[in-house]
Image (cartoon, rainbow, N blue to C red):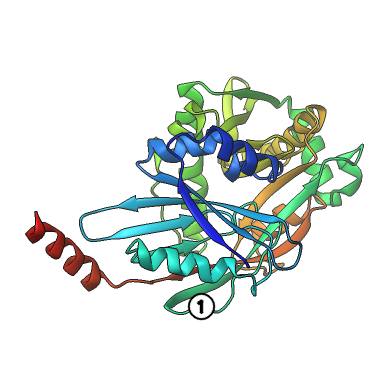
Amino acid sequence: MTNFSAAALNTPILEICMTHMQNLHNPFYTPEYITYRRSQGDIPWILSSNSIHTQSEIYCLAFMKSGRLRHSLEIPSIPDISGNEPFWHGLMDFCRNKGISNLSINSFGAQGGLIPQLKHERSRKKRYEYILDLTHPDALKKMSKQHVRKVKQAQKAGVKMQRTCHQEAVEAHVRLISLSMQRRKARGENITISVPTKNIQHLVSTGTGEIFQTVLADRVVSSNLILRAPRAGYNHSGGTSPEGMDCGASHFLIYEIAGALRDEGKKTLNLGGVDDPDPKSGLVRFKAGFGTERIQLEAARFMPRSVVFGFLQHFLSSIRK
């Protein structure tokens, strides 16, 4: 018989170790990331089930946020399992029992996994992530000619890389993200300009991520926040100034980050995801030009319980007191 279990991580040492050991390439399964989510007011849960295919245990981290009427649950990164595993029905039963009105299933840093067609689905989308193999001895040989030219242009201009967790770096990172978003919005992309500065600060202060930046004549011209796992890095966010764009700073920075992580024994660098795989997209061409492998993933949202149910549940519990 296949069982499903869920436990809130109030004393999470054992559970984190079990989950962490199975997800060495995934920064969304690290103790630091759990600490970060706690700082955001989320309650971490570990969900587990026996696999009908491998007979091994499936572990999944989820984060719950509770309000007076709404209770939400987010899975940042789905496990690499098929859509017919009993885990999924156990998950939906768990959501109904907990009165979850909004279930968000994402695939950041996931190795694969399929989200089945379940009841109460509200939306679904395909997304794509780009994985750079760090075991190759020379990243330049895998890059496109244009990317190699940009890296050499930045080297010739005297661009240098620095890595830091200081507050000044966070401020520069946020500023450069805003500049990049403004350029994308000017090109007609439907994006939000605002940057959650406090979230960036907490990712850095909890040790979940580290900021890598390129400096030209004492000016930070490109910046990337890399989330860290024992064997991988994940590009959370980045931005570049117009000056940095002109001298190839963003290409140089990814190249240098890849080398630094490889020297630390990391196996992969995930350059992050896009929703549109159009090869003419500037973002797609940038990520693909490093010689990355593209993997197709998906994300979905469900509404296991309605907001009306949450109101009634809150009302009934209040009159019993």
Inspect this view and state whether residue 220 appears.
yes
Residue at 58%, 45% in the rendered image: 28
Residue occupying the point 81% across, 33% down: 262
Residue type at numbered disc 1: Leu
Count of picture labels: 1
Q: Residue at x 72, y 56 (%)?
A: 56
Residue 286 in percent (x, y) is at: 70, 53
**Splitting the image into 4 quarters, where does residue 129 fall?**
bottom right
Of 261 and 179, the residue lying toward us:
261
Give the vertical position of 125 relative to 77 (above or below). Answer: below
- 250 and 167: which one is in front? 167
**Front one among 10 and 233:** 10
- Asked if 151 appears above or below 129 in the picture, the reply is above
Quarter of the figure that contains the N terminus: bottom right
Foreground residue among 259 and 174? 259
The residue shown at (72%, 55%) is 130
* Residue 139 point in image, percent of width and height: 86, 41
Does residue 225 appear in this view? Answer: no
Identify the residue under disc 1. Answer: 118
Query: Tag 1, which secondary structure?
Result: loop
- Name the side, left or right, on which 91 lies relative to 164: left
Q: Is residue 191 above or below residue 205?
A: below
Q: Position of residue 309 (x, y in %)?
A: 24, 71
Place of residue 242 in the rendered image (x, y in percent of width and height, measured from the top left): 57, 41
